[in-house]
Amino acid sequence: MKHPFTFDSPSLVFIMLISYSALIGAEPADAETPALSFIQLVGKEDADCAMKDGQMMLLASSSQDYTIEVWVDRWFMEVQTADHTKHVLSIDTPTSLLGCSNTLSGKQRWTIHSAKVLP
């Protein structure tokens, strides 16, 4: 008599696929999603940036409880630059200035690469 759970058993293959799918969809222990939910890129009025027809861009944390490490990438004239900067946002310093959205040479923007809650 054949064992009911062999590798050629369709039910075992199905169970293995479901288990594998669940593992792929599971968040890692240090998931970045919760930290990202507190972080925003914000534009604010600034006299120097207004002269260049832009806004001052800043990184802002809305967290009242956590210190968050954020890595940011800069794009200049729609080309990603080598700038990959770390910012630590805390309750005492919830914002970090990035720069003007428009420079004399062209437009720039920032994207959030990653964020994690620090212990």
Image (cartoon, grey):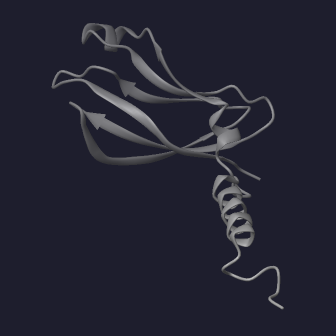
**The one of 36 and 17 positioned closer to us in this rendering:** 17
- Is 77 placed above or below 49 here? below
Total numbered circles: 0
Q: Is residue 40 above or below residue 74?
A: above
- Horizontal placement of 117 versus 46: left or right? right
Quadrant hosting residue 60: top right
Relative image position of residue 12 (x, y in whole percent)? 74, 72
Is 8 placed left or right of 41 in the picture? right
**Left or right: where does residue 103 sit relative to residue 16?**
left
Residue under the image location 68 percent in, 70 percent down: 13
Residue 92, position in %: x, y?
72, 31
Tell me which corner region of the image, top left, top right, bottom left or bottom right, holds residue 15.
Answer: bottom right
Question: Residue 12 or 81: which is nearer the viewer?
Answer: 12
Which residue is pictured at 26% across the width and 8% down the height? Answer: 51
**Residue 57, percent across and down?**
43, 22
- Residue at image position (38%, 14%) is 55
Residue at 41% from the left image edge and 11% from the top image edge = 46
